Amino acid sequence: MRPEIDEVIQNGVVEYQGVQLVRLKPGTKVYRVFDDIDAFNNGGYWTFELPSSKANFYRNTAVRPEWNGGTKYVELTVPSEGLPVWRGNAANQRILNEIDDWTLLGGGEQVLIPYDIRTNHPDFLTWLDNPVGNAKTWTD
C-alpha cells in the first residue's frame, strides 16, 4: 500500500467530483463481473452487490458489452487491515462512439481498487473467495 494513500485516509475522507477516497471495513464484500476475454478478475471496478441480471449490470455500471461480456464474477472479502478505494457512482457512457443521444445510464455505486493494490499486493488473490470466477447465468 502506498504511504500517501494511508496518510490521506487517516486524515479523513477525501472527495473529488463526487468520488470519495475511503477505506472499506474488514469483512466487506465487493463483486467484480468479468469475462476473461476483455475484462479479468483483477480489474479495477467492483460493486457492493452482484447484479441481478445482465441488463442491470450493463445499465448500472455503464459498461459497454464490447468491453466486458459479463459471463463470470468474483467476490472479494476485504482483509483485516481494510482496503483503500475510490467510491462513487458510475458515470453514464455512450452506447456508440460519437453519438451522445444513446447512453448507458450508469448511476450504480461502485468502487475502484487502486492498480498498485490489485497488481502488487502479495495477498490480493487470497482475498478473492472464488479467484477463478464462477459462471454467471442470467435469464435476460
Image (cartoon, grey):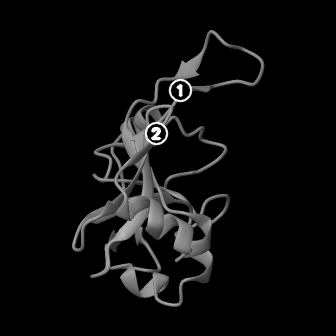
Which amino acid, mark 2?
Answer: Thr
**Residue 69 position within the rendered picture, expressed as x and y whole percent measured from the top left:** 57, 51
The residue at the far front in this view is: 11
Any part of residue 105 in sight: yes
> Residue at 46% across / 88% down in the picture?
123
**Residue 117 position within the rendered picture, expressed as x and y whole percent measured from the top left:** 54, 74
Badge 1 crowding class, 10 Å Cα cut-off, few under 14, some 14 to 19, many 20 or more, is some
Any part of residue 42 in sight: no
Which residue does the numbered mark 1 point to in the structure image? Answer: 92
Image quadrant for the C terminus? Answer: top left
The residue at the far left in this view is: 27
Q: Residue 59: name its quadrant.
A: top left
Task: Label 2: state its secondary structure.
Answer: helix
Residue 133 bears which disc, if any? none
Which amino acid, mark 1?
Answer: Asn
Task: Label 1: state its secondary structure.
Answer: loop
Which residue does the numbered mark 2 point to in the structure image? Answer: 61
Q: Residue 52: name its quadrant.
A: top left
**Residue 55 position within the rendered picture, expressed as x and y whole percent measured from the top left:** 41, 35
